[in-house]
Image (cartoon, grey):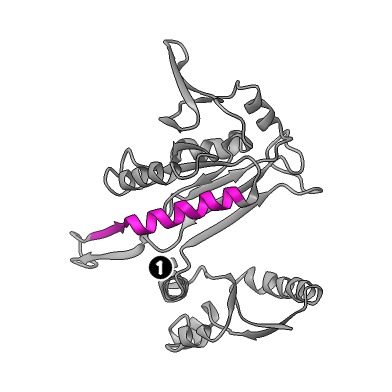
């Protein structure tokens, strides 16, 4: 029988509720697959900070390293600044174990009413993939003239080719494994961040060339945020860099969005620039009254 050791970090707030429930599900699933789970709970988090002045003890990472996996709930408290909870617990864990991919599914389930009108269960099925250790999470910067009228704060965002490529490939591989819409859309702010996210855009195009079976697109985060609410299914697979996200969104083939794609009549209003990479072709037209639109025209069928 396979034996696995799991470190439980309920943390704060809702984490105290969801981790016990998640443990029950894991135990039931393990019993069905011949796996024996051993759990060790740690009380680190905001309450620990109030008692000791730190989010977790100095040997926390070594204690976590003894386990096969970490199940973490939530971290944060209104009386503790967010940068303390992040840099005191979450980021050290991410960096120590190279947890570079933040994967967040968003699914509309049966029996759940969506605040978005007109969507049925299964018609919204999105996965948001975000780089988890670089970018703004690099935590490089500092203060000058601290707490003085002329105070200056500098925050440096760090993008490496290695970091960009591995999270981008992660999103493409996830699109293949899910095998649904097979679409990856990169979301950035490369019009304002003309170095780091331009590098990201270049790496995205290079990696996309290795996945000819995956449809690709690119949006600025402004338009992406709007489309998350306006029409989530047509966005398909998303992904983006740290804090701006590698949004990976898929929808079922039976959804109205995919039917519209099959009819090749989806047009995305250009609230900002849009790009569509191979294997789609792009046709643009201008209209004085309506602005310009980018029409995504299907040039092939997924296998």
Please determine whether, in this image, residue 271 is positioned above or below residue 237: above
Q: Which residue is more in the foreground, 300 or 15?
A: 300
Tell me, yes or no, if residue 22 can be seen here.
Answer: yes
Q: Which residue is more in the foreground, 49 or 249?
A: 249
Residue 281 at x, y percent in the picture = 47, 25
Tell me, yes or no, if residue 292 can be seen here.
Answer: no
Asked if residue 274 lies in the magenta stretch, the reply is no
Q: Residue at x 50, y 55 (%)?
A: 170
Residue 35 at x, y percent in the picture = 74, 79
Please determine whether, in this image, residue 175 is positioned above or below residue 71: above
Q: Is residue 271 left or right of residue 119?
A: left
Task: State the SS at label 1.
Answer: helix
The quarter of the picture where the C terminus appears is top right
Q: Is residue 105 left or right of residue 134?
A: right
Main SS of residues in magenta: helix
Q: Residue at x 47, y 50 (%)?
A: 245
Label 1: few (<14), some (14–19) or many (≥20) C-alpha neighbours in 10 Å: few
The quarter of the picture where the N terminus appears is bottom right
Segment colored magenta: 153-176
Q: Is residue 104 left or right of residue 188?
A: right
For disc 1, the marked residue is 83
Asked if residue 166 lies in the magenta stretch, the reply is yes
Q: Residue at x 21, y 61 (%)?
A: 151
Residue 230 at x, y percent in the picture = 59, 33
* Image quadrant where residue 41 sits: bottom right
* Image quadrant where residue 194 sits: top left
Residue 243 at x, y percent in the picture = 43, 54
């Amino acid at each position: 029988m396979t034996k696995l050791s799991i470190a439980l970090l309920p943390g704060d707030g809702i984490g105290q509720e969801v981790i016990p429930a998640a443990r029950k599900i894991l135990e039931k699933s393990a019993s069905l697959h011949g796996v024996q789970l051993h759990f060790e709970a740690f009380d680190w988090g905001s309450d620990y900070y109030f008692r000791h002045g730190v989010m977790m003890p100095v040997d926390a990472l070594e204690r976590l390293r003894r386990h096969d996996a970490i199940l973490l709930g939530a971290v944060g408290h209104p009386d503790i600044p967010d940068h303390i909870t992040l840099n005191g617990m979450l980021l050290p864990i991410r960096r120590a174990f190279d947890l570079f991919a933040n994967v967040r599914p968003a699914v509309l389930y049966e029996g759940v009413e969506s605040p978005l009108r007109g969507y049925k269960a299964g018609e919204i099925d999105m996965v948001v993939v975000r780089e988890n250790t670089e970018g703004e999470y690099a935590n490089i910067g500092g203060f000058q003239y601290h707490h003085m009228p002329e105070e200056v704060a500098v925050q440096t965002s760090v993008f490496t080719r290695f970091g960009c490529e591995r999270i981008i490939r992660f999103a493409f591989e996830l699109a293949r494994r899910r095998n649904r819409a097979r679409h990856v859309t990169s979301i950035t702010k490369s019009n304002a961040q003309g170095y780091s996210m331009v590098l990201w855009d270049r790496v995205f195009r290079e990696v996309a060339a290795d996945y000819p079976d995956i449809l690709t697109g690119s949006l600025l985060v402004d338009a992406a945020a709007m489309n998350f609410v306006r029409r989530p299914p047509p966005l398909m697979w998303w992904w983006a860099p740290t804090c701006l996200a590698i949004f990976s969104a898929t929808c079922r083939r039976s959804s109205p969005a995919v039917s519209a794609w099959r009819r090749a009549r989806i047009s995305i209003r250009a609230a900002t620039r849009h790009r569509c990479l191979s294997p789609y072709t792009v046709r643009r037209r201008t209209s004085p009254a309506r602005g310009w639109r980018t029409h995504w025209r299907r040039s092939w069928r997924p296998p």
